[in-house]
Amino acid sequence: MSKILIIEDEAAIRRVLKKIISEENEAYQVEEAEDGLVGIEMISKSDYDPVLCDIKMPKMDGVEVLEKAKKIKPEIPIVMISGHGDLDTAVNTMRLGAFDYISKPPDLNRLLNTVRNALDRKELIVENKLLKKKVSKKYEMIGNSEAISHIKTMIEKVAPTDARVLITGPNGTGKELVAHWLHEKSDRTKAPMIEVNCAAIPSELIESELFGHVKGSFTGANKDRAGKFEAANGGTIFLDEIGDMSLSAQAKVLRALQENKISRVGSDKDIKVNVRVIAATNKNLTKEISEGKFREDLYHRLAVILIEVPALNERRDDIPLLINFFAEQVASEQGTAVKSFSKEAVKLLQNYNWTGNIRELRNVVERLIILGEKEVSENDVKLFATK
């Protein structure tokens, strides 16, 4: 049920507005506030879809109500009600975040259209929030072990800064989860996070992928193309498996970090970029440096903060939580009931040698849910989880 609040000091106008809105849809729950102070108190205690607020009121005028309400509940669409002489003020309230304004006496169709549009706006905001929660849940970090708790603490401290982070650890441990949480908890969360898998891009194409190219710079370059650094401007670029990047590309990345500038392949024109760089690797970069495969100066630029993600075998206490999480995830994806795992099955999985880490555990849990009994048993694990 949609809840609508009318803040208006004239009782007769409140009654007219309430009557018009209630007759439009019986499902609307319309509440009243006789002045701005009461309205702000009601907004702080309850959730409203749109709020209709008069501008000229005693005690607290509509402009002040708008400013305070936006601080309490930023997502509420607020429609200002203006008298003939208040139009300049009404326009100003739009700059302050008002959804719309209607003039007194209100035109019936204008009023109802404005209310419908405000309701649609609130519904869209709610849907976007739910979608964001779903996206965030995809990258949720599961575990209470000492190692994972340490990583979570590091993220809380580092994320609000622009410090570069190098994430290390074996394949399948969830390095990308750390990168996503660093971005989501940063001040750059409204800007994009662009991911580049350096191991998946041929060495001859990595520079074009990162920095873009101009038309004719190489065979197949039929038009100008922006690279990932430009796409991530204002946000975060995640260079996954950076240990596989070519030395020539490393040199260009180093310049981008030093000067906050890049140039497209085939061009000498500098392009300024404002990008936070997070990198990850499963390689021992110190060893790569000694073998001449990785630039030491780039390593020191990237590794301002080092976060090491442990292998699953080093955090076995987290396995029961991970099993439950993946069981719910698989059930949600397949539209089936969540299967439970017996204590014996969980114990057996805790003692398993997880060479593939989190990624392998997730695959095994999905396999057991598909092939196992209603409650996944120790026998199911022996039959279906073994290599």
Image (tube, rainbow, N blue to C red):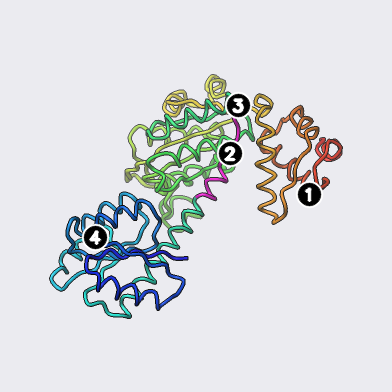
Callout 1, which amino acid? Ile
User: Label 2 vs label 3: CA separation?
Assistant: 30 Å
Residue placed under numbered mark 4 in the picture: 35
Residue placed under numbered mark 3 in the picture: 145
Q: Closer to the observer: label 2 or label 3?
A: 3
User: Label 2 vs label 4: CA separation?
Assistant: 63 Å
Q: Quadrant of residue 300?
A: top left
Task: Say which element carries label 2.
Answer: loop
Callout 4, which amino acid? Asp
- Packing grade of label 4 (10 A; few <14, some 14-19, many >=20) is many
Q: Mark 2 or 3 closer to N-term?
A: 3
Q: Mark 4 or 1 closer to N-term?
A: 4
Task: Say which element carries label 3.
Answer: loop
Q: Closer to the observer: label 2 or label 1?
A: 1
Q: Which mark is residue 370?
A: 1
Residues shaded magenta:
133-145
Q: Closer to the observer: label 4 or label 3?
A: 4
User: Label 1 vs label 3: CA separation?
Assistant: 29 Å
Q: Which mark is residue 199?
A: 2
Whether 141 is among the magenta residues is yes
Q: Is residue 384 left or right of residue 136?
A: right
Q: Mark 1 or 3 closer to N-term?
A: 3
User: Label 4 vs label 3: CA separation?
Assistant: 53 Å
Q: Closer to the observer: label 4 or label 1?
A: 4
Q: Closer to the observer: label 1 or label 3?
A: 3
- Residue drawn 78% across and 43% down? 368
